[in-house]
Image (spheres, rainbow, N blue to C red):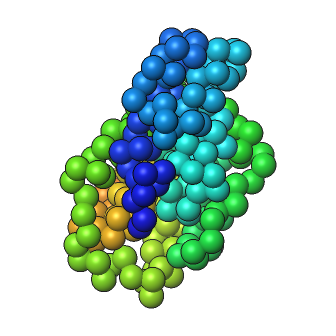
C-alpha cells in the first residue's frame, strides 16, 4: 500500500478527528484550526457542512476523507464500522453492500459506491463516534501494524477471503442480538490486514469470525430447540 502524504493512516486519522471536532463544535473553527488543515481539505469541507446544519456525515463524505473513490478494503472497513452500532436494520442494509464488495474483492480498481448508499447520512452523535473510532484504527495501523506473514494477503488467495467476507456478511444479515459485533470486527481486522499486508491480523479475523459463527450457531440452535418444544407442547405426539 502506498503511504504517501495523502494516502497514509496518520493523515486519515487527522482528517477524521478534524471532521469530528467540526461536528462537535457545530462550526468551522474546530476543524480549521486542527492539525489536518493542509492535508485534510475534506475535513474542512465537512466542518463547513456541519456549520450549515448538515445532520452528520454521509457515507460518500466518509469515503472522501480517505481519498476520492476509495479502495475496496477501505470501503469494506468503513461499512464494517457502521455495522457495529446497535441500530435496528443498519447491519442488514450494510450486509448487501458488503456482499457486493466481496464479489469484486482483490481487483485493483477503485470500488464504486452505489448512489443510494452514498447519500445515507449518520446522525451527528454516531458520526462523531464513527469518526473517532476510525481515527483510533488509523493510529493503531500507523503505530503497530506492519507487513508479516504476507503470503496470507497474496492476490491468489483473494477468492478465499471473498468467501469469508460473504460468510461474515450473512452473519450480519441475520437479525441476532449483538450479532453484528463479532463479524464486523472480523471484517475490520481483515481489511487492515489486507491493506497493510499483515497476516497476523488476517489470522485474527479468522479467529474472531469463528467465535462469531459459533455465537450465531448457538443462538439459532437454542431458537430451533425452543420452537420444537413449543410445537410439541401444542401438538403432542400420538401415543
Answer with left or right where residue 145 lies relative to residue 22: left
Answer with left or right where residue 225 lies relative to residue 215: right
Quick check: can you spot residue 180?
no
Q: Quadrant of the N terminus?
A: bottom left
Residue 126: horizontal and vertical position, in percent?
52, 27
Give above or below for 221 relative to 86.
below
Residue 17 position by quadrant: top left
Q: Which residue lies most toward the front here?
A: 38
Give above or below for 145 relative to 37.
below
What's the residue at 64%, 21% (across, down)?
A: 48
Residue 125: horizontal and vertical position, in percent?
52, 21
What's the residue at 50%, 62% (across, down)?
A: 73
Answer with left or right where residue 108 lies relative to residue 193: right
What's the residue at 53%, 48% (across, down)?
A: 66
Front one among 133 and 42: 42
Residue 127: horizontal and vertical position, in percent?
53, 28
Front one among 180 and 218: 180
Front one among 148 and 95: 148
Residue 173: horizontal and vertical position, in percent?
58, 53
Front one among 78 and 69: 69
Q: Which residue lies most toward the bottom here?
A: 156
Amino acid at each position: 500500500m502506498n503511504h504517501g502524504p495523502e494516502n497514509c493512516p496518520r493523515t486519515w486519522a487527522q482528517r477524521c478527528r478534524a471532521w469530528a471536532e467540526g461536528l462537535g463544535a457545530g462550526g468551522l473553527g474546530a476543524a480549521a484550526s486542527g492539525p489536518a488543515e493542509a492535508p485534510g481539505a475534506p475535513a474542512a469541507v465537512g466542518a463547513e457542512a456541519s456549520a450549515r446544519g448538515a445532520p452528520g456525515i454521509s457515507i460518500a463524505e466518509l469515503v472522501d476523507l480517505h481519498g476520492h473513490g476509495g479502495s475496496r478494503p477501505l470501503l469494506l472497513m468503513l461499512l464494517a464500522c457502521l455495522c457495529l452500532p446497535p441500530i435496528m436494520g443498519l447491519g442488514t442494509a450494510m450486509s448487501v453492500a458488503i456482499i457486493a464488495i466481496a464479489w469484486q474483492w482483490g481487483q485493483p480498481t477503485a470500488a464504486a459506491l452505489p448512489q443510494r448508499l452514498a447519500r445515507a447520512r449518520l446522525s451527528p452523535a454516531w458520526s462523531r463516534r464513527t469518526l473517532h473510532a476510525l481515527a483510533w484504527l488509523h493510529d493503531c495501523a500507523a503505530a503497530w501494524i506492519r507487513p508479516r506473514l504476507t503470503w496470507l494477503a497474496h492476490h491468489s488467495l483473494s477468492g478465499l477471503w471473498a468467501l469469508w467476507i460473504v460468510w461474515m456478511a450473512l452473519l450480519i444479515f441475520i437479525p441476532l442480538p449483538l450479532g453484528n459485533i463479532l463479524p464486523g470486527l472480523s471484517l475490520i481486522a481483515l481489511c487492515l490486514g489486507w491493506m497493510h499486508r499483515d497476516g497476523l491480523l488476517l489470522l485474527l479475523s479468522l479467529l474472531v469470525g469463528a467465535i462469531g459463527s459459533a455465537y450465531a450457531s448457538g443462538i439459532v440452535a437454542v431458537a430451533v430447540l425452543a420452537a420444537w418444544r413449543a410445537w410439541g407442547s401444542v401438538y403432542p405426539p400420538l401415543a
